[in-house]
Structure formats: structure tokens, C-alpha cells
Amino acid sequence: MIRTSRRPRTRLLGNPFIGGFTDIDREGTNLMIGDSELLDDIFNDDSPEHIKLLCSMSAHAAFTDVVVSARYKEKSNGNVKTLSYHLYDGSSLNMTGFVSKLSITALDILPEFGTPDSRWQRYISENNVIYTKHFQTQASSTNVENFVDHDAQETGIIHTKSRAHSFAGSYFSGIKLADIQPYLFYVGTGYQAKPYISIISASDALRLRKVTLAPGVSDDSLSTLEDDICNGSIQLSIPDCNTTYKSVAAIKETLTSDIFQITFRKEAGDG
């Protein structure tokens, strides 16, 4: 006769156990403790629940030679002046570490969830570029509007600052996924009305509120690569399986290389 005990465990290694109950099959000596959340061997059927890919990144930098200008006054009764900068030629801003787009290439299927099916290996080999993140850039010369910078100390001179406009994306070998993000630029006049151009990361722009976003810059366009992955922006779809998989997590442990891992989960209702 099989007897089953279903009493909550109160202590495990000195800590409360609240994840579930203890089921004991006394006759068969089978023991299951707590809630079972083990992932299935996903490659045992046609609709695996999870897939983990080994990936790499490659960056591309293609910028148009554009001029950004703004009009300003040093004093309210003064003459109108114009500041002007070549945005991408490196004369005003250091372009090291800035890119226009980033591609993710799948290198292999990791066997963490089972032995890969040949269909998946074939799909990855034929569709190895699984995602490209495009960063908003300035495609043409533009005149931006300057406003009085009320955050600047009053000195009798008008200090101005523009809104923040799209510039490029950040990237260098070994960078953290959360740091691969858009950057913005803004112009203004500072101490003694000296013109300047500055850049700011998307995270700082949203967190510090040092600048106001230009109308063409939405919060959605300021996502990091880590945001894109966790929000399911990278999708895999194999026609003969009639299923869709969305990215849910990523791990990057390397400091000097572009290798990292992405985990995908099957969409609910597929398969």
C-alpha cells in the first residue's frame, strides 16, 4: 500500500521552506521535494520550450557628413549669432566607440536543454544573423532650436541649450549588453556664451533629465540591447515547426570578446 505524506516542511538547512510540500512514496521510495520547475528535454519533441544560442556581435559605423547649427544671442539686445558643427567627422566629437548598427550572429545551439535536432542546426546555419539593432542617426544637415538654459548660473549673459537629438549607438569589444545603447547630442552656449556640443547616453538622459528629448526621439528608441533581448525583440521562427520563439534573457561573462548567450522561449499557444 502506498502512503503519501503532504505536510509542509518548515525548515531546510536552517531556512523556512515555503516552495511546496513533501510527497513521499514509501513503497517505491520516490522522493519529490518542493515545486518542480525543471525544464523538459526540449529537443525530444517538435516544439521545444526553450532554446539557448551562443552568439557574437559585429558593429558597423556608417555616418553621413552632416552639419548641425543653431542660432543664439549673447544678450537680449545683442546680434543673432550662429554656432555650427560637423557632427560625424571627428573634429568636434570623438567618434571612437560609436556605431550606426549592431548585428547579432548565432554561432551554435548550446546543449543545455538536450541534444540539438538537425532542423535547428540547419536553421541557424542558414539564418545566422538573427538580429540587427539600428541606432537613430542624423541623416541630413539640420538647424536645431536653442532655448534659454535656466539651469545655468545667471551671469548677465544668455546661456542656451537645445533639445537632445539622435546621434549614434555605443559599442566597443567587451562592452556590457546594458551599455550598448543610443547616445544623443545637444548644443548650446555656456560660460561667456562660448558655443559647445555635447553627447549624453540614453540612460543618463532618462535618469538625470539634464536635457529635454527632441520631438523625433521617443522613449522606445532609447532601448539598450539588453532591453531588446529581454523584451522579446529577437524572434526565431522555423516554418516546419509552426512556432515562434522570443528572446527572454542573455548572459555575457566575457570582458574582452563579443561572445554571449541568448535564451529563447516558445510563445504561448504555439506548437
Image (cartoon, rainbow, N blue to C red):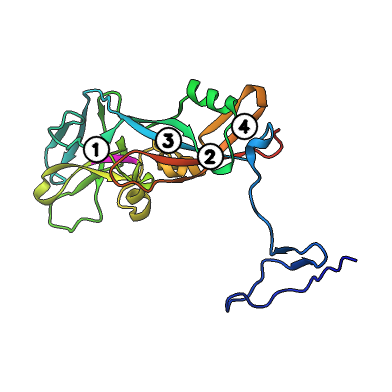
Is 110 left or right of 182, judged from the image as shown?
right
Residue 244 bears which disc, if any? 4
The first of marks 4 and 2 along the sequence is 2
Residue 111 bears which disc, if any? 2
Location of residue 124 in the rendering, given as x and y in whole percent from the top left corner: 50, 26
The residue under label 3 is 55
What residue is rendered at 58% in x and 36% in y? Answer: 115
- Asked if the residue at tag 2 contacts the one at tag 4, i.e. Cβ–Cβ closer than 8 Å, the answer is no
Marks 3, 1: nearer the viewer: 3
Q: Is residue 126 visible?
A: yes
56 vs 141: above or below: below
Which region shows up in magenta? 182-186
| Mark 3 Cα shell of 10 Å, populated few (<14), some (14-19), many (≥20) | many
Spatial CA distance of label 2 from label 1 is 34 Å
Spatial CA distance of label 4 from label 1 is 34 Å
Spatial CA distance of label 3 from label 2 is 14 Å
Marks 2, 1: nearer the viewer: 2
Q: Quadrant of residue 215?
A: top left
Q: Quadrant of residue 29?
A: bottom right
The residue under label 1 is 97
Quick one: SS at disc 3?
strand
Marks 4, 1: nearer the viewer: 4
What is the count of numbered marks? 4
